[in-house]
Amino acid sequence: MNINDKYITILFQKNSRSFPLDDVKIKIKGMMCGHCEKTVTEALKSVKGVTKASSDFKNGEAIVSFDSSLTSLETIKKAIKDAGYEILDEDEACPRTSKTCHH
Ligand SMILES: [Cu+2]
């Protein structure tokens, strides 16, 4: 599944109100390699209520599906921070030089 397929899924789910899952794309600062991707993905999947999570260090973002009755975007963002990464606000540019890589 490529990234465009995921966006189509997100749009579909956003439009179907009866669907309990929420999908978000989160900009993350500090992911430098595949190991970082795995760390972030595992951190996201460990959050109760998260049903699907993937991250992409090249784009500096994670895509998360979650049940909004079980968890919240704030909890998900906290899990990313606890894993050692920072959340970028929507209007912040993705940094190309990061010093937060863990190895
Ligand atoms: Cu890394």
Image (spheres, helix red, strand yellow):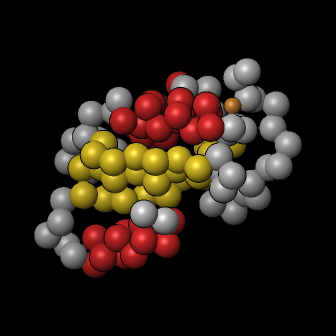
Percent coordinates x, y for residue 100 in the rendering? 75, 29
Percent coordinates x, y for residue 33 in the rendering? 68, 38
Q: Residue at x 42, y 63 (%)?
A: 1
**Where ligand 1 lies, by quadrant?**
top right
Please give left or right for residue 32 compared with residue 5 in the image. Answer: right
Please give left or right for residue 90 compared with residue 93 in the image. Answer: left
Q: Residue at x 49, y 72 (%)?
A: 4
Question: Is residue 89 something one can see in this rendering?
Answer: no
54 in relation to 10, above or below: above
Q: Residue at x 63, y 60 (%)?
A: 90
Q: Examine the image and state in which quarter residue 103 appears.
A: top right
Please give left or right for residue 19 compared with residue 56 in the image. Answer: left
Disc count in the image? Answer: 0
Identity of the residue furthest to the front in this view: 1
**Viewer-proximal residue among 74 and 46:** 46
Question: Is residue 79 something one can see in this rendering?
Answer: yes
Please give left or right for residue 91 compared with residue 70 in the image. Answer: right
Percent coordinates x, y for residue 88 in the rendering? 65, 49
Percent coordinates x, y for residue 57 in the rendering? 65, 46
Identity of the residue furthest to the left in this view: 18
103 in relation to 34, above or below: above
**Viewer-proximal residue among 12 and 71:** 12
Identity of the residue furthest to the top in this view: 103
Q: Residue at x 53, y 30 (%)?
A: 39
